[in-house]
Every structure is written in structure tokens, then in C-alpha cells.
Image: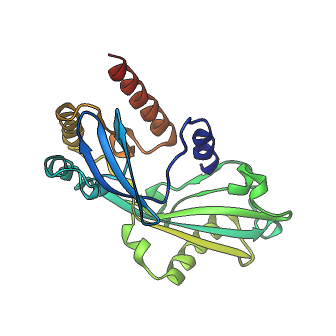
Amino acid sequence: MGSLGETIALRLNNPVQTGIEITSIVKKDKWNIIWKRNGELKEENFDALVTTTPAHSLPLLPFDKKISLSLKQLAPIPYTPVSILIYGFKRDHIQHPLDGYGILVPEKENMNILGTLFTSSVFPSHSPEGHVLLTTFIGGARQSDLVTSPLDHQNLLVINDLNQLLGIKGDPVYFKQFHWLNAIPQFNIGHNRYLEMIKKIESDNPTLYISGNYCTGVAVGKCLLAGLSTAEKIKQNISS
């Protein structure tokens, strides 16, 4: 995922600006953006503006009051929390051949994990010789409360599930956790009303484009297609 973003950035004519604080977004003839980096203010005008921030972050962007109020309508889109627990094991401590991409665990199995990626099977360079790396997901809509439970409790449940599924007979030699309180947008019944709101906001504010995984889907492929679609719309609108 990191390589994908870095490679795209290298192909752009202008460098990607990171680590900045946007202080003002105003629509004049073009979009006037003022941002701050290391205390220094910079200003630039743009033909089009695309936002791919999470829905709950949209009202925090420094638009004028009218646009901010319209974006606030999207803030209630629900997100579920997810924790990722990454374990390194000695290869001979796992009975399963790990000969695949990973495993997904359906709800009817009554386990605590959502699934596990066999990370080092897909990317062998991610673990040293004689070791394997496993990336396990917990929480989501199924067991959101588990994400906020003590880490020791999470570890116990996850290792127990992995032992049943993979046959683990030793302790991990590496561990790291990542946690996202608002990880996955939910496409619940009635989500279409938010998509209609997005269309209305874009119609009221030409050259403003709202994109993101809460619009078209959370899969990487869906996000890539959404980006290409948005780019094509911008190209056609600017050309006309």
C-alpha cells in the first residue's frame, strides 16, 4: 500500500504536500487554498478541489459556513473500529503450511477474529529466515467492543483462535498493534440518502468533488476505480 502511493506521487508534475495544516478553503474564480507548514503560510489557486477525507472529518475542513453546513450532513455515516494485531512466529512453531493469502472467519464460527493475512507468504521479505508474519483483524461491526478491551485480553483471544486454526505451539517473537477508532464506513440500509447528498453538494459547488471509500466501497480496487472516475470527470469539466 505504501509503495502504491509513493509510486503515484513520483509520477506527478508537482510534489505532494504532506505534514501541512490547511487554514482556509475559499471558492473564488478558482479554489483558493491557504496552508501552513512550520509556521510559514502559503497560498495557491486550483481549478478543481477533491476531498477524500473520512466522512466524519469533512465538517472540520475550513470551508465557508455554507459548504461546511452541507458537508456536516455526511458526518453521521457510521464507521466501525478495527484493531490489527501483528505477530511474528518461528516457522516451525506453526503446523499450518500457510500456503495461501490468509483466512476469513465467518460469524457462524463464533470466533473473536475477523480474519488473518499470511503476510510473509504474500511478501516473503516481511519476515526473516525461519520466521513468519501474521496480521490479524478484530472488531468491526461484529464485535466492536473487543477493540477497546485491554490489550492482554485481545492477545489471549486472538492467540487462542489462531492456535485452533493454525496449530501454534510457541510464543510470538514479535508483536505490534495498530488501532483505528473509525476504520470502516458502513453501507447500511438507507446509505443511498448520503450518496444523494453528495450529488447535491457537488451540483451546488461545481469543481468540488467528494470521493472516498464511503462513496463507492472500501476495497482497494473500488477506491482505485473511484479515483480514476473522479479524475476523468475533472478532465471533462475543465476541458469544457
Q: Percent position (x, y) of residue 127?
A: 77, 62
204 is higher (above) or lower (below) than 62: above
| Residue at the image position 23 percent from the left and 40 percent from the top | 27
Q: Percent position (x, y) of residue 6?
A: 61, 46
Q: Percent position (x, y) of residue 116?
A: 59, 58
Q: Quadrant of the C terminus?
A: top left
Q: Nearer the viewer, residue 237 or 171?
A: 237
| Residue at the image position 20 percent from the left and 43 percent from the top | 190
Question: Is residue 75 rendered to the left or right of residue 168?
Answer: left
206 is higher (above) or lower (below) than 89: above
Outermost residue, top direction?
240
Q: Percent position (x, y) of residue 193?
A: 18, 40
142 is higher (above) or lower (below) than 74: below
**Total tally of numbered discs in the picture:** 0
| Residue at the image position 52 percent from the left and 56 percent from the top | 105
Question: Is residue 138 rendered to the left or right of residue 189?
Answer: right
Q: How is the image coloured?
A: rainbow
